[in-house]
Image (spheres, rainbow, N blue to C red):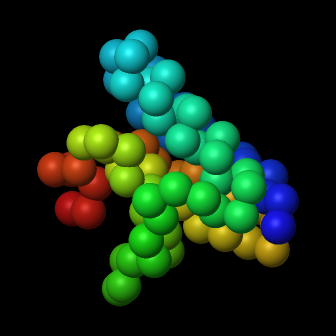
């Protein structure tokens, strides 16, 4: 199933604060989500947004609505779930 990836403004701001090398790696992993949510994706329990993508020390927090993947935050793992 193909998904359309959308970014919330806060996620874009998070990405801008990350160094270029990590940002490039994170964006390439996010692009892989378009193809059937491939990657290191986990459904989160008792947490909103519902899904997390692991990219090294960073976590991409997102939700799936119909055929859209909505990226809410991109945070370092120590800050992602607090």
Quadrant placement of the N terminus: bottom right
View extreme (left): residue: 78
Quadrant placement of the C terminus: bottom left
View extreme (top): residue: 20
In this figure, what is the number of numbered marks?
0
> Nearest the camera: 18 or 43?
43
Give me the residue at 36% from left, 84% from top: 45
x then y, percent, for residue 63: 59, 67
Residue 51 in the figure: left or right of residue 70: left
Above or below, 34 against 20 in this view is below
Answer yes or no: is residue 70 visible. no
x then y, percent, for residue 21: 39, 16
x then y, percent, for residue 53: 44, 56
x then y, percent, for residue 65: 73, 72
Answer yes or no: is residue 39 visible. yes
Give me the residue at 30% from left, 42% from top: 56
Give me the residue at 38% from left, 44% from top: 55
Give me the residue at 49% from left, 22% from top: 24
> Nearest the camera: 82 or 52?
52
Residue 58 in the figure: left or right of residue 42: left
> Nearest the camera: 28 or 58?
28
């Amino acid at each position: 199933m193909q998904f359309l990836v959308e970014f919330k403004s806060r996620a874009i701001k998070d990405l801008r604060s990350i160094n270029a090398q990590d940002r490039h790696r994170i964006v390439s992993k996010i692009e892989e989500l378009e193809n059937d949510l491939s990657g290191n994706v986990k459904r989160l329990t008792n947490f909103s947004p519902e899904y997390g993508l692991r990219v090294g020390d960073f976590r991409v927090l997102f939700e799936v609505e119909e055929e859209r993947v909505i990226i809410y935050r991109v945070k370092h793992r120590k800050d992602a779930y607090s």
